[in-house]
């Protein structure tokens, strides 16, 4: 049994950690990874494309069901991102394909191919999907913090065209915890402004470098703060985000629907 056949067996049996839960709650996820492995396994060995370093099979996703390239839908892109996070596939770079294949794409002016290395499902990480809210768009900065920068870059590679993404190192976010601990309740807008004014470790940029206005930067930071909250990141600091109306202690004199950062049952301060 080759590793693709074993992948198909494991996917159907759903014995991997959190695999069954992921397939049950994320529509299309099981079908997508099953189709990728079945299509690759159905290709005659003489016509298969391999990663020259690992020996794993490569497959072009946007060409699974057609003799001609077809557009990958936004839903498919999202599912592919989840499969990258869970280490079922790996998005490869253009320079990783064989010179012959590279020349074919160049001759056809075809540089939009979604080519993936199919990984061994034995090593999958569906447990990473536990914290991801169903069908919510992924946030690059939060994903890098919850997994690693390499995974974040792979998941967002070529899914975005003219946009840059920012990676904030974990230690740069400790200033946020200290600020909330000091004031107990703060609005996300005030917190983002404070962070932007006091950040000492500048973020790394992935993708196209943009010149962002201050409002754009604040929006980016607020989106990251909310995404990290959904992923449970702030629990390590005993912090969370709520509507001001739902705050029991230290409620602010702002509208009840205003999102605020609050301190909840803090036991050990981890920031300094």
Image (cartoon, rainbow, N blue to C red):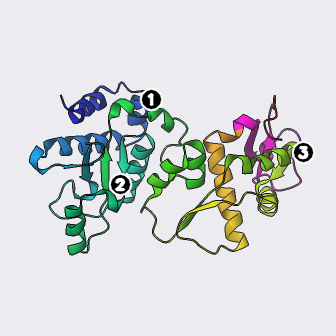
Residue 252 in magenta stretch = yes
Percent from the top left, x then y, of residue 135? 47, 48
For image coordinates 44% across by 59% down, the residue present is 157
For image coordinates 66% across by 44% down, the residue present is 229
The residues tagged by marks 2 and 1 sit, at their Cα atoms, a distance apart of 26 Å
Percent from the top left, x then y, of residue 225? 68, 51
Q: Determine whether, in the image, residue 81 is placed left or right of residue 269.
A: left
Q: Which of 54 and 243 is in front in this view?
A: 54
The quarter of the displayed image where residue 106 is located: bottom left
Pointer 3: what residue?
Answer: 182
Pointer 1: what residue?
Answer: 18
Earlier residue among tags 1 and 3: 1
Q: Give the range drawn in magenta.
A: 235-264
Pointer 2: what residue?
Answer: 92
Element type at mark 2: loop
Q: In which quarter of the image is the C terminus?
A: top right
């Amino acid at each position: 049994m080759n590793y693709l056949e074993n992948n198909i067996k494991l996917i159907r049996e759903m014995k991997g950690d959190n695999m069954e839960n992921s397939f049950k709650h994320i529509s299309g996820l099981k079908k997508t990874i099953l189709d990728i492995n079945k299509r690759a396994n159905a290709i005659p060995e003489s016509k298969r494309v391999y990663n020259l370093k690992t020996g794993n099979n490569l497959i072009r996703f946007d060409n699974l069901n057609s003799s001609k390239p077809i557009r990958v839908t936004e839903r498919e892109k999202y599912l592919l991102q989840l499969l990258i996070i869970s280490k079922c596939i790996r998005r490869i770079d253009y320079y990783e394909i064989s010179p012959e294949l590279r020349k074919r794409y160049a001759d056809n002016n075809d540089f939009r191919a979604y080519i993936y290395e199919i990984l061994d499902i034995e090593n999958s990480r569906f447990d990473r999907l536990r914290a991801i809210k169903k069908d919510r768009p992924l946030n690059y900065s939060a994903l890098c913090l919850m997994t690693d920068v390499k995974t974040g870059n792979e998941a967002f590679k070529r899914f975005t065209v003219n946009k840059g993404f920012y990676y904030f190192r974990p230690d740069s976010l400790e200033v946020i915890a200290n600020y909330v601990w000091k004031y107990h309740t703060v609005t996300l807008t005030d917190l983002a402004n404070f962070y932007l004014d006091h950040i000492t470790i500048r973020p790394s940029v992935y993708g196209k470098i943009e010149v962002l206005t201050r409002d754009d930067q604040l929006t980016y930071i607020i989106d990251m703060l909310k995404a990290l909250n959904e992923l449970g990141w702030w629990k390590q600091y005993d912090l969370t985000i709520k509507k001001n109306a739902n705050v029991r202690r230290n409620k602010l004199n702002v509208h009840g629907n205003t999102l605020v950062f609050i301190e909840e049952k803090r036991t050990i301060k981890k920031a300094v």
